[in-house]
Image (cartoon, rainbow, N blue to C red):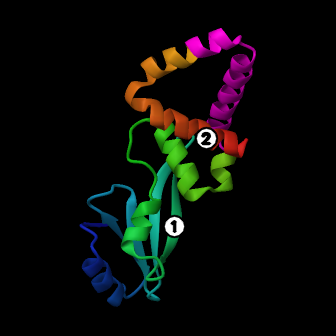
């Protein structure tokens, strides 16, 4: 396992000289969990590690040079420590069925559905009070919460 500052120049240089046998992973110093795997055949693929239900997952997010460094980095899930951000970013960026089928996603979807049903049964005055309280409580996390809600409602 090699850790490098991945730049267009370093990626191009490493891809020109594949390992004699097997494969080698080059991890990015700037974005933990993100890297480039080069095989002895010369094939190069971008990968990302993330967790689903506590299990580490490696996903291939594209081939090099068809997908360049900038485009590959853009697919990488959120660096935020907030699990809502990680789940929403991973789902929207990768969109794999395994994320939709994960227990973590199902728990969050079930919770969202329960809150939605409860909210719909409130009077208009109570709904407005909830919106005001949510705005005050959410503060800087409001955009992340709205993004998570949009991801869940689009997929359930």
x and y, in percent, of residue 56 in the image: 50, 50
In the rendered image, the quadrant that contains the C terminus is: top right
124 magenta-colored:
yes
Residue 76 visible? The answer is yes
Q: What main secondary structure does the magenta stretch of the protein show?
A: helix
x and y, in percent, of residue 154 in the image: 68, 45
* Residue under the point 46% across and 31% down: 142
* Residue under the point 69% across and 25% down: 116
* Residue under the point 24% across and 67% down: 5
Give the Cα separation between the discs numbered 1 and 2: 23 Å
**Could you tell which of marks 1 and 2 lies nearer the N-terminus?**
1
User: Callout 2: 10 Å neighbours few (<14), some, many (20+)?
Assistant: few
Residue 55 visible? The answer is no
Looking at the picture, does residue 121 appear above or below residue 26? above
x and y, in percent, of residue 64 in the image: 44, 80
Task: Give the camera-side residue of 23 and 11.
Answer: 11
* Magenta-highlighted residues: 102-129
Looking at the picture, does residue 112 appear above or below residue 57? above
Q: Which residue is mark 1?
A: 61
Left or right, 118 with respect to 20, comes to: right
Left or right, 99 with respect to 133, comes to: right
In the rendered image, the quadrant that contains the N terminus is: bottom left
x and y, in percent, of residue 59 in the image: 53, 62
Q: Which residue is mark 2?
A: 150
Q: Quadrant of residue 94?
A: bottom right
125 magenta-colored:
yes
Q: Nearer the viewer, mark 1 or mark 2?
A: 2
Looking at the picture, does residue 74 appear above or below residue 11? above
């Amino acid at each position: 396992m090699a850790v490098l500052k991945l730049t267009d120049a370093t990626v191009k240089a490493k891809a020109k000289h594949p390992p004699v046998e097997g494969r080698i992973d080059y991890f990015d110093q700037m974005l933990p969990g993100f890297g480039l795997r080069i095989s002895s055949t010369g094939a190069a693929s971008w990968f990302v590690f993330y967790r689903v239900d506590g299990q580490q997952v490696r996903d291939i997010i594209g081939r090099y040079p068809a997908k360049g460094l900038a485009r590959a980095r853009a697919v990488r899930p959120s660096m935020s420590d907030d699990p809502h951000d990680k789940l929403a970013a991973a789902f929207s960026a990768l969109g794999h069925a395994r994320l939709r089928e994960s227990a973590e996603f199902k728990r969050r979807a079930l919770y969202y559905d329960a809150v939605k049903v409860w909210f719909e049964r409130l009077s208009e005055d109570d709904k407005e009070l909830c919106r005001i309280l949510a705005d005050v409580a959410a503060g800087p996390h409001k955009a992340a919460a709205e993004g998570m809600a949009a991801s869940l409602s689009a997929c359930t």
